[in-house]
């Protein structure tokens, strides 16, 4: 057990090492690997390829280290939630059905839209959760940006739920999250991650257009 703990500690220390700098800020191995895996994940999502989900798990583990090191605790905690949701989303894409009924009587899960009622509920839930999470982060952590951290955190949960259910509106939510996050990560000196989210913003538009062609 001690050998395993030592190996884990050595691996974590290695991932947090910073072999280079970008615009005066260190870039760790965790951030660099997370950057590459995240791009591969989004490419799979655009193509409605199920391999996006295991890539999401791997990149979330790496970014949990990155964000915790930058005191973005909402974003760090979000990665743990992403991992759990990625397992669920993976299962949804493999075995999920559109029908809300019991059993397996519904059609196989496919790209679709939210109805107005569903869209309204998603928006209200997101807006209500944002200040609540911001208050928790302000009182329970030493973050200097509790509400700025909370906003993309909550919206990312909404976007991931929509992605798992193959609802095209996930791309619109991701676009907002990504544009906002560029500024947040730049403020924290995470320049490589800020660049990644700028690319994500562009890919959100690409994803929307690609999924639109698959609508029934």
Image (spheres, helix red, strand yellow):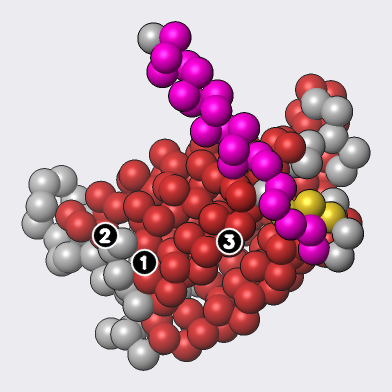
In reply to whether residue 150 is colored magenta, the answer given is no
Q: Is residue 165 left or right of residue 186?
A: left
Q: Which residue is mark 3?
A: 35
Question: Residue at left 62%, top 81%?
Answer: 202
Q: Which residue is mark 1?
A: 166
Question: Looking at the image, which is closer to me, 57 or 153?
Answer: 57
Q: Is residue 128 left or right of residue 147?
A: left
Name above or below for residue 215 compared with residue 190: below
Question: Looking at the image, which is closer to me, 137 or 75?
Answer: 75
Residue 100 picture location, percent across and down: 25, 53
In three-dimensional space, the C-alpha distance between marks 3 and 2, rounded to whole angstroms, equals 24 Å
Closer to the N terminus: mark 3 or mark 1?
3
Q: Secondary structure at mark 1?
A: loop
Q: Is residue 167 visible?
A: no
Q: Mark 2 against mark 1, which lies toward the viewer? A: 2
> Is there CB contact under 8 Å for labels 2 and 1?
yes
Q: What residue range appears in magenta?
A: 2-22
Residue 7 picture location, percent across and down: 47, 24
> Is there CB contact under 8 Å for labels 3 and 2?
no
In three-dimensional space, the C-alpha distance between marks 3 and 1, rounded to whole angstroms, equals 24 Å
Q: Which residue is mark 2?
A: 93
């Amino acid at each position: 057990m001690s050998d395993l703990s030592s190996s884990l500690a050595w691996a974590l220390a290695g991932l947090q090492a910073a072999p280079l700098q970008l615009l005066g800020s260190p870039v760790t191995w965790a951030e660099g690997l997370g950057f590459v895996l995240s791009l591969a994940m989004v490419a799979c999502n655009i193509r409605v390829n199920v391999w996006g989900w295991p890539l999401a798990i791997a990149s979330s583990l790496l970014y949990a280290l990155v964000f915790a090191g930058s005191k973005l605790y909402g974003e760090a905690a979000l990665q743990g939630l992403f991992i759990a949701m990625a397992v669920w989303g993976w299962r949804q894409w493999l075995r999920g059905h559109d029908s809300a009924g019991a059993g397996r009587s519904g059609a196989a899960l496919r790209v679709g839209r939210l109805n107005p009622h569903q869209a309204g509920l998603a928006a209200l839930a997101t807006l209500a959760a944002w200040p609540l999470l911001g208050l928790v982060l302000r009182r329970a952590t030493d973050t200097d940006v509790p509400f700025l951290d909370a906003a993309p955190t909550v919206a990312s949960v909404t976007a991931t739920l929509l992605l798992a259910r193959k609802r095209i509106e996930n791309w619109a939510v991701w676009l907002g999250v990504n544009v906002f996050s560029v500024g947040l990560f730049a403020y924290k000196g995470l320049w490589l991650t800020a660049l990644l989210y700028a690319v994500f913003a562009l890919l959100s538009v690409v994803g929307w257009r690609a999924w639109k062609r698959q609508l029934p």
